Amino acid sequence: MILKINCFLILLFSFACCQRQENNDSILEKEEVFIIKHFDQNESFQSSLADTLQMYRIEYYLDYNIILIDTISDIYYHKKRFYCLTGLEMRNNLPFFRNLQPEYFQKNTSITEILNQVLSDSIKPERVYIAFNRDTIMDERYFQLKNLFIKNNIVVSTRNPTEEEDVVLSSIINNRKYKPEEIEWQRTQYVPEKKFLKGNK
């Protein structure tokens, strides 16, 4: 009798596990999810020509930087196009300070208008960054933008907003004066200690 009860419980448990897996699979099929991959700080690259470590850098800003915040309907992007520093740098796990200012950001709610803005630029961008404020992306706007750019032969990369973008956008959204000289930067490299340059180079 005990053997029959044990067999029944095992069969019941197995059926429940299979059913739960099927439910999970169906949920994943309905939801598009993108997970932002983080840079592995312990990762090292070796030259294919020599047994020495290559000096390399991570680029945090590309031609266009579009920032989605999944709790608000507005979409922000850098109004002013600029390019990263060129050349080889020491390996950087943190973004460089760019002296971003609130007036450099454009607010929009329409994906179509952002796409038109990018495509109407006199110099068509080769790459676009879509920055999202959460690591796990389930916001349909992200996938719409990404697919539209790809259809127009623009490479799309994804990242989290930099600390600098976070602080500037917070000042814009909360209507507070932005004072970068008063901020204790934790996730930004090469911040001027005394003098903040005007403009964005």
Image: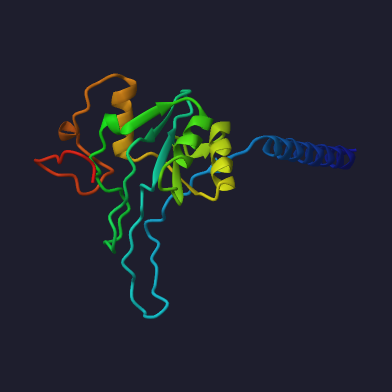
Q: Residue at x 36, y 79 (%)?
A: 51
Left or right, 23 with respect to 81, comes to right
Q: Residue at x 29, y 19 (%)?
A: 175
Q: Residue at x 40, y 43 (%)?
A: 64
In this view of the protein, which residue sits in the foreground, 30 or 5? 30
Name the spot of residue 46 as percent of width and height, x first: 39, 72
Name the spot of residue 160 as percent of width and height, x first: 41, 41
Q: In this view of the protein, can residue 139 be seen by the observer?
A: no
Name the spot of residue 183 as percent of width and height, x first: 19, 33
Res. 81 image quadrant: top left
Res. 184 image quadrant: top left
Q: Residue at x 42, y 77 (%)?
A: 48
Please state, as top left, top right, bottom left or bottom right, where the N terminus lies in the image: top right
Q: Residue furthest bottom?
A: 50
In this view of the protein, which residue sits in the foreground, 29 or 143? 143
In this view of the protein, which residue sits in the foreground, 164 or 110? 110
In this rendering, the answer to whether 71 lies above or below 54 is above
Tally of numbered tags = 0
Name the spot of residue 143 as percent of width and height, x first: 57, 38
Q: Residue furthest top?
A: 175
Q: Residue furthest front?
A: 122
Q: In this view of the protein, can residue 136 be seen by the observer?
A: yes
Left or right, 166 with respect to 153, comes to left
